Image (tube, rainbow, N blue to C red):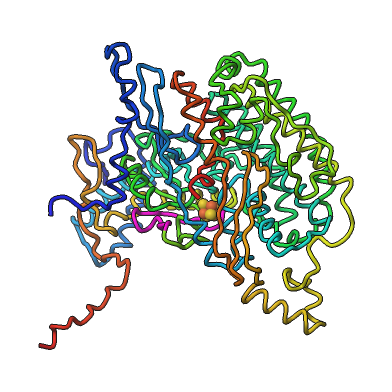
Amino acid sequence: MDVIRSKPGVFPGIVEAPSQQDLKIEQRRARDFLKGDLAGQELEEYVESRLLTTTLSKAGAWAASNALFPATFGLACCAIEMMSIVASRVDIARFGFEAFRASPRQADIMILSGRVSIKMAPVVRRVYDQMLEPKWAIAMGACSSSMGVFNNYAIVPADKFMPVDIHVPGCPPRPEALAHGILKLRKMIQDDPDLGWRARYDAEKTAELMPGYELSEELTTPPSEPYVLDEPVAATPTEGEGA
Amino acid sequence: MATTERSAYRQMEDSITMDARLERFGTVDGGEHELLTVNLGPHHPATHGVLRLLVTLQGEVVIDLRPIIGYVHTGIEKTAEQKSYWKAIPVVERMDYLAYMFNATAYCGAVESLLDLEVPKRGQYLRVIHMELNRIMSHLVWLGTSALDLGAMSMFWFCFRERERILDLFEQSTGQRMHTRYIQVGGVMEDIPRGFEEKLREFIAIMPKRVGQYRDMLYKNEIALQRLKGICPLDEESLLALGVTGPLLRAAGNPWDLRKADPYCSYEDFDFKIPVGTEGDNWDRLAVRLAEMEQSVRIIEQALDGLPEGPHITEDRKIALPPRHELGTSMEALIHHFKLVTEGFRVPPGEHYYPIESPRGELGCFVRADGSSKPARVHMRDPSFVNLQATAPMTRGTYIADLIATLAMLDPVLGGIDR
Ligand code: SF4
């Protein structure tokens, strides 16, 4: 009889192992899926190595996405509306989001609630850098996404100095809109916890890890299809070119 | 290059120290006790925004402190110069973000004075209703967050419950919860819709009871009493010397309120009292604001009862947009509409300062006009900015925990300070 074992000692006892029947079905599906790419023993090994890891990371993402700890970080008008998502009407505690943490070290999501001035931007960046992995950021309001109604010398959009996962439009966004943004982020985390911003921003080296831990391969290898933020600007012809 | 160049401004920033000011404390206890300078903020949950404080401590006692501001500088005053008069209202509104109706009224009042424009009575009454609602809302946010600083969580839920009611009212009459742009040059944007009055009456019936409930929660609370009673008082003279206005000054016993002292928007029509304190300590600051909420409810009630009929905005078509139905029938209305929307109205040269009583004190708007359709200068005298100066004299010689409580009772709004 065909017995499938996960690799010994990889994730002992964290996820309840699927029943034999389920595994067989999954295996068959995967085999159909990969037909042509891999064959024989290779295919067996591939399927074997994938099955449990996906289940585990999925479980992890599900847990993480339902217990986000936002950093207490109010900037301007939007912060007042951000406070009201905790209050009784919207009650974001329903989604496990209410544990605001004063220290960035304990938080895993940052809500940029309001306008970021040029003087504040380094501070915001520093707070963001102090947060531990994995971390996400929501830019709340028109100001932190696009400089809003002001659009002048003093304001800088958040995308210019830190990676942002969700933009919530509005001036200020209603609390319901922010809650919607949070739910979207939850969905994103469940689908793909990494969101790949390190690769996008060419920032693989910036991950902060506990001593003795290594970066996972996923983070250190650049994606096969590089994510292009902007179309490369055509080099402007310099004066000396013709000579 | 090893080091990055720092701008002159950054260097100035970094060079801020307490040394010069601390020299006179240098020999405290014959130099036995070391002074410790602590940085508080700009990211600190108890600073009510992005205020940064350099606090010098001796043990736990505050020796001196210095606020550093500018972390939400938005360039609002400059931006207002680049917009025509009516387009500047939204940016001006976003200064003190808990008093948007007040910002807009101060600005519009200054422009109206320059234009020598009379606001119809109904427009004035509607302004009063919305401003007083806004005052209650601002005090509610202050009460909730300040109580949070003192460690009382449930106060926050109660205050925000009532705040939502007020924001619902705003949404009904103006279409937005915050930054409503309801106050217009010449009056208000729109008349109140059907159903607004009933909802407002419901609210003013319930609000005094709620204030009573807040009192019950705080006045018999041992922790609140100990944290606030007799803490960080400042006498009337020092407050006046610093230019402090609003509830802080009234808590020290001076009944200065521009609504009575220099009535605007028909405040002289209403019968209300000005709550004052006796000691000028944190407790009085709390009590004065709680009583102010009740007085605001009284004003709203009177304004609603006596709401006059008539237009809500000036009939002068050169200033205010013509109503929609006129556009289909009148060529003139169409021309006025086009002129207003494209260029805006012109204001004769001159300058005017228009002070009103915001939830935090005297909020004045100075506008200088040069005859064009854009203001030459817009400046706000923001009460938070002036009141913040009183932090150091209030807290010198107290414990650092009291500093946090005092800062909460000062109620600074950083958007207004930095602008
Ligand atoms: S988006 Fe609007 S409400 Fe939010 S901070 Fe900017 S101006 Fe204020």
State whether residue B288 is above or below residue A72: above
Quadrant location, the N terminus of chain A: top left
Q: How many labels does the image show?
A: 0
Residue B152 horizontal/vertical position (percent): 57, 24
- Outermost residue toward the bottom? A242
Name the residue located 66 percent from the left edge and 30 percent from the top edge.
B250
Nearest the viewer among B253 and B289 is: B253
Secondary structure mostly seen in magenta is loop
Q: Give the range drawn in magenta.
A: A154-172
In the rendered view, does B26 fall on the left or right side of B194? left
Nearest the viewer among B23 and B104 is: B23
- Outermost residue toward the left? A243
Specify the quadrant of the image occupied by residue A82: top right
Residue A159 forms part of the magenta stretch: yes
In the rendered view, does B169 fall on the left or right side of B225? right
The answer to whether residue B43 of the structure is visible from this angle is no
Name the residue located 68 percent from the left edge and 41 percent from the top edge.
B135
Quadrant location, the C terminus of chain A: bottom left
